[in-house]
Image (cartoon, grey):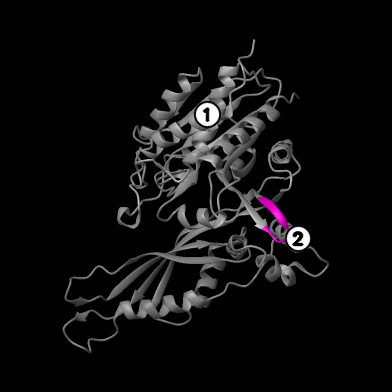
Amino acid sequence: MLEPAVTETDLRTEASELLRRLVACDTSNPPGRETQAVAVLEDYLQSAGIACERVAKDPERANLIARLPGRGCGPSLAFLGHVDVVVAQRDEWSVEPFAGVERDGAIWGRGTVDMKCQVASTAVALATLAREGFQPAGDVLLLIMADEEVGEAGVGAPFLVEQRPDLRPDFVIGEGAGERFDTAAGPIYLLDHGVKATAEITLTVRGAPGDASLPDTGPNALYEAARLLNRLESYSSPVRILPEVETLVDALEPGEAPAVERLAAARATDSAIDRILGALVGTTFQPSILEAPAPQNVVPGTVTVTIACGPLPGTTAEELEAELREALGEGPYDLEVTTPPKGGSTSGTDTPLREAIEAFLADEDPEARLVPTLGYGYSDCHVIREAYGSVAYGFIPFRHADAMTNLKTKHGADERVLVDDLEFQARAALAVARSIGSREW
């Protein structure tokens, strides 16, 4: 006999409490130390009868598999998340970034949006289903990864799929889109059914070392780097609209004209959409680290700049380097593609998983549409697609948040998630799990 359905108050309270515990785990990457957050999830899920398994190459950086067993007669569903977070600069925050402060109807802290909110909400959904006695046709899983934000330690998703080739979930919901955009064409939610690629290039700028007390010691590599970066800042990548992105342009600015001619009008429908579309129609280059290792009174002879790149799917390392050279122009520098383009995979959109998400939105937000497109940043969905052939979508629904606030704060200061959205995400996970879990082969 099934237990009474959980109330919204229960979901709200449980998800909030669990998220605050997860935020209190400082899993800044580097160094990560994700196992502390995994232990919190184990404690919560095992109390609801959910079996948990650690998969760890490094004991301090464990991945987690939590499973609600199915009857073996239907598709499996996995909620995919990560618990490492980007480093927080405490002096830039108005609250302690690892305190899980609840203020103004939101929980504040590093990782609340990216992506401990979804980790908490899907864990609560899984525990709720277990307590209700729900028996899905196929397994419902929670897969929690280490090292998503950096991905260089070899301890996260690539290690897990190597160790557990048997998992192979049919459907996966992971990190990606989900904000509600109030556009001129009506409210929409984006569904990431693929992602752009990511890459990293090291720019080494050459100068002449010399005495910093003298005015004329030769070219200063820092000045040369500044000139090159000014050129890069003013560079605009050639516009290319892939079919996966054209669907978004069509939704925002329908018409018979070519998508490239409708792009400006589509971008003008919403300021946050403008920022996202800007990333989806060309290569992005963002300097992230500058190093000039010279003594205090010495003009540096070399400066290195790490450039985070977001090429479109299918871009080769050679093409990416050629575009960056075009952006920088001539100068005393060298380029090295230190991390070649990775990512760029997609899943089909005509699937039961999309239907389940659309059915939830039809009940909860009937005026809104779900629009499939590409994600602008890398996620572990790519690893799962490549290893298992799963249908994997990025979707964390934010019904109430201002989309621009999410875009500005999730790797910045004062990151926070509204408790209303945390509850909304838990309801979404429950609805999707019940829908997929009710399907039989």
Question: Is 423 placed above or below 238 here?
Answer: above
What main secondary structure does the magenta stretch of the protein show?
strand
Circle 1 SS class: helix
Cα separation between marks 1 and 2: 36 Å
| In-front residue for pair 197/181 | 181
Where is residue 30 drawn, in percent x and y? 35, 47
Residue 129 in the magenta stretch? The answer is: no
- Figure quadrant of the C terminus: top right
Q: Which mark is residue 406?
A: none
Question: Is 330 placed above or below 39 here?
Answer: below
| In-front residue for pair 186/65 | 186
Where is residue 306 drawn, in percent x and y? 40, 64
Identify which residue is drawn at 81% across, 65% down.
255
Mark 1 Cα-neighbour bin, 10 Å: few <14, some 14–19, many ≥20: many
Nearer-N-terminus badge (1/2): 1
Mark 2 Cα-neighbour bin, 10 Å: few <14, some 14–19, many ≥20: some
Q: Quadrant of residue 288?
A: bottom left
Report the residue marked by disc 1: 124
Residue 187 in the magenta stretch? The answer is: yes
Residue 249 visible? The answer is yes
Report the residue marked by disc 2: 250
Question: Is 402 placed above or below 206 here?
Answer: above
What range of the chain is rendered magenta? 183-189
Identify which residue is drawn at 65% across, 66% down.
267
Q: How many marks?
A: 2
Identify which residue is drawn at 19% across, 76% down.
298
* Residue type for callout 2: Asp
